Amino acid sequence: MALNARVKKTVLLILKIGIAAGLIAWLVRSGKLEPAKIWHAVRDHPFWLAVAFVIYNVCILLTANRWRMLVVSQGIPARRGECVGMTYIGCFFSCFLPGGTGGDLVKAYYVARDTHKKAEAVTTVFLDRVLGLYCMVGFAALAVLFHLKDLWRHSSPSGAFGLTQTQFLAVGVLSAFALATVGLLVLLSSHCRRLVHYVLGHLPQRVGGVLKRVYEAVYLYRGQKLLLLKFVVYSVGAHGGAAVAFCLIGRSLGEPLAMDLTRAPNYFFLIPLGLVLNGLPVAPAGVGVFEWALAFLFATVLHPGEANLGAEVAALSHVIIILTNQTGLFFYLAGRRKVAEALREAQAAGPVPDPHA
């Protein structure tokens, strides 16, 4: 059984690497990604890339503190430095190491190793992901509203339902955010709570008991409006900072979009959407997927000729992301024993899906 699981993980990893390599090769052959241009940006404009690197790491610190708020609210003690270190370790594990546990579960069991609230700790990690994704889509939806008139008049190719591709994209983003908002409100309503408890009460005690604790951990935030507001502020700071960092990457490429103050705000719409697509569990660290996503978005929303800009911005951003994730290795080596204990405990808890699988 263990051997079969290991073979499946290896095959899945090879498949993901193959998809990433195939997407990159297709982008290069189609002319949407020019490696020489990326090399020139690194060689000729290292300052803008260095500033983008610093801003991206500030975004990591914001997300680490955002997660810490959720952990502390569950009555689990967590020091700021530990949460920052575990966030970097999580990035490293999730992007570079194969396995069914992933960096998120290591984070959860690390902060909960001295408490019985294991289910609540795991919940904070996945809730941080879900709410972070919700805020990212909301950030993109807000940017769509600011650009709605221009997006609606954009002469992109025809899409579905009689809309152009740009119009369909705008409607899709706004609809996704509206549906997610309604879903959260329903999930956190007192009427839904009774229904959830009724359903979970009819499950086997071991499964139903854990799921009930997870649900109650989520429901706890219903009355913590100030905490949720802080979460949104941290998220807006992180997503906005990422957009600025990517804009500086575009500037290093010498493209007019990043230097034109009337057009640069498009990054605040395009980058969150690209990051949502980048989260699809298709390739390690989203390599190839993010390049394709930004190539498509830039060509659809801006101009067909700017597919190159989108792919090249994504490729350079992956250099920065990979370098940032290497920081997790230093945190891991510094606290190797405690992290290894958390990893063993997470694996002993049973097969939990990898967030990136």
Image: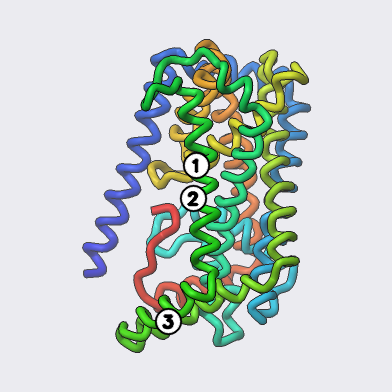
Residue that extends furthest to the front in the rendered view of this protein? 191
Real-space CA distance between mark 2 and mark 3, rounded to the nearest whole angstrom: 23 Å
Classed neighbour count for the residue bearing mark 1: other residues with Cα under 10 Å, few (<14), some (14–19), many (≥20): few
Secondary structure of residue under mark 3: helix
Q: Which residue is mark 2?
A: 179
Q: Which residue is mark 1?
A: 175
Q: Which residue is mark 3?
A: 197
39 w.r.t. 20: above or below: above
Res 169 seen here: yes
> CA separation, marks 1 and 2?
6 Å
Amino acid marked by disc 1: Ser
Determine whether the residue tagged by mark 2 lies in a helix, strand or loop.
helix
Residue type highlighted by circle 3:
His
Q: Nearer the viewer, residue 263 or 286?
A: 263
- Taking 123 as reference, is 132 above or below it? above
Q: Position of residue 49 (x, y in %)?
A: 71, 30
Residue 109 position within the rendered picture, expressed as x and y whole percent measured from the top left: 54, 74
